[in-house]
Image: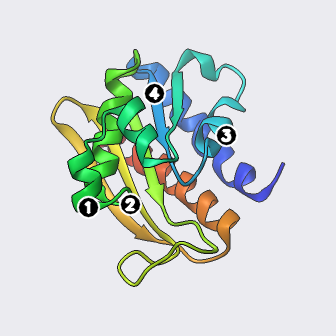
Amino acid sequence: MNDIEQQVSPLIRQLGETLTGQGSLLASAESCTGGLAAALLTALPGSSAWFERGFVAYSNESKTEMLSVSAQTLTKHGSVSEAAVAQMAVGAIARSRASVAIAMSGVAGPSGGSPDKPIGMVCLAWYLGPNVIHTATEHFAGDRSAIRGQTVRTSIEGLLSRLAA
């Protein structure tokens, strides 16, 4: 088990219990993590009881085609924006049987950063129901692997805290 798996396994176990207790299904919409969240979520035996599906929408075109992120949002705000991840989360709900979704997009590096969107900048969204979408922007340090791992961990922690509220 690698570091990120060790860090998130207890969180995922808790998340699974919470979602099962609420009768909720989860969908993920990922960009910079490339399916890492879905892989870690489904590494837990029995996760099929609460994890419905995952979307990896890496390009802007895939975000539009698979998750209905508007071209206008991508042009105005970019794919690494709270507006884009909010739409990714809504799209994941619309194209699944899930009632809860997480979405993430960011600049994992080692290239691709800009002054406005530096390496380590990640936008997250949590869909908890109609008109209940939370978003946040984080700035993580480290290499590509560390940034992706922190993104997944923060996404799961954020979902757990919001489900408990």
Nearer-N-terminus badge (2/4): 4
Q: Which mark is residue 77?
A: 1
Give the quarter of the figure containing the C terminus: top left
Q: Which mark is residue 37?
A: none
Which residue is drawn at the image coordinates 76% and 58% (left, top)? 3
Q: Residue furthest right?
A: 1
Which residue is drawn at the image coordinates 31% and 22% (left, top)? 94
Nearer-N-terminus badge (2/3): 3
Q: Secondary structure at mark 4?
A: strand
Q: Which residue is mark 4?
A: 26
Q: CA distance from mark 2 to mark 3?
A: 22 Å
Q: Is residue 42 above or below residue 143?
A: above
Location of residue 101 by image quarter: top left
> Is residue 100 visible in this depiction of the protein?
no
Q: Which residue is mark 2?
A: 80
As rendered, which of 74 and 84 lies closer to the eye? Answer: 74
Which residue is drawn at the image coordinates 48% and 20% (left, top)? 20
Q: Which mark is residue 40?
A: 3
Q: Is the C-beta separation of discs 3 and 1 under 8 Å? A: no
